[in-house]
Amino acid sequence: MVVKVFGQIKAANPQRVLLCFLEKGIEFEVIHVDLDKLEQKKSEHLLRQPFGQVPAIEDGDLKLFESRAIARYYATKYADQGTDLLGKTLEKRAIVDQWVEVENNYFYAVALPLVINIVFKPMFGEPIDVALVEELKVKFDKVLDVYENRLATNRYLGGDEFTLADLTHMPGMRHIMNETSLSGLVTSRENLNRWWNEISARPAWKKLMELAAY
């Protein structure tokens, strides 16, 4: 059965789900929700995602929202199909889950407001909070130090294999690398830069970039 993904293919959170599907070989259909027109706030979409965000999915009778929860579900349901995104032992799965939580609570929590201020506010003619941006840059620098240390002794965040620990970071990292002036924070760190170059060369990621038409 084809999974319906309600969202905008260029948006980071739907990309997290779509990348999981591409890595796992899961068929999907993107139902476009125009964020610029605030379609995510309309009553029809609020039935799928009561907080007015994207993505949401429909898979038969199953309806889910929250990109990381969706990715975990399908990585588990199709554990034996495509790329193993979970880890092969209970201990490795715990490490993967840990870094998925780190991505949400430390990486994306800083990267998102940076991207909003540096990329999106100028697009809509809104003023940038310069003081906030400078404060967030300092925080982000410290966060990336943790990643650099982790990747000094591990090929990927979860260990020796590419997993959800890496996948969940990729849409946010793309914004940082391609749409802000902050890519130097990554390229100046040997291990972090090596990791990004490797994961962004994966066929599934390249396919997603083609679908998003960047």
Image (cartoon, helix red, strand yellow):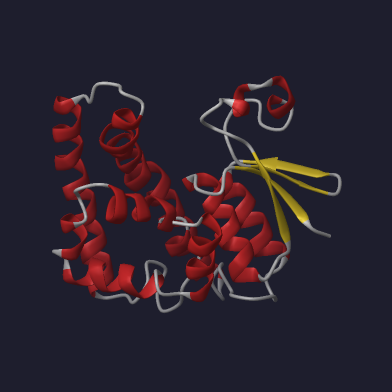
Q: Position of residue 80 (x, y in %)?
A: 70, 76
Q: Is residue 204 left or right of residue 120?
A: right
Q: Position of residue 54 (x, y in %)?
A: 58, 38
Q: Position of residue 47 (x, y in %)?
A: 74, 27
Q: Position of residue 110 (x, y in %)?
A: 30, 40
User: Residue 63 appears in which quarter of the rendering?
Assistant: top right
**Rendered view: 109 above or below 89:** above
Q: Is residue 94 visible?
A: no
**Rendered view: 50 above or below 33:** above
Camera-side residue of 137 and 158: 137
Camera-side residue of 102 and 195: 195
Q: Is residue 191 left or right of residue 161?
A: left
Q: Is residue 9 visible?
A: yes
Which residue is pictured at 52% across the width and 55% down the height?
212
Q: Is residue 132 left or right of residue 72?
A: left
Camera-side residue of 122 and 19: 122
**Rendered view: 55 above or below 194:** above
Which residue is pictured at 31% across the width and 39% down the height?
115
- Tell me the quarter of the image containing the C terminus: bottom left
Q: How many marks?
A: 0
Q: Is residue 4 left or right of residue 107?
A: right
Which residue is pictured at 24% across the width and 21% down the height?
127
- Tell me the quarter of the image containing the N terminus: bottom right
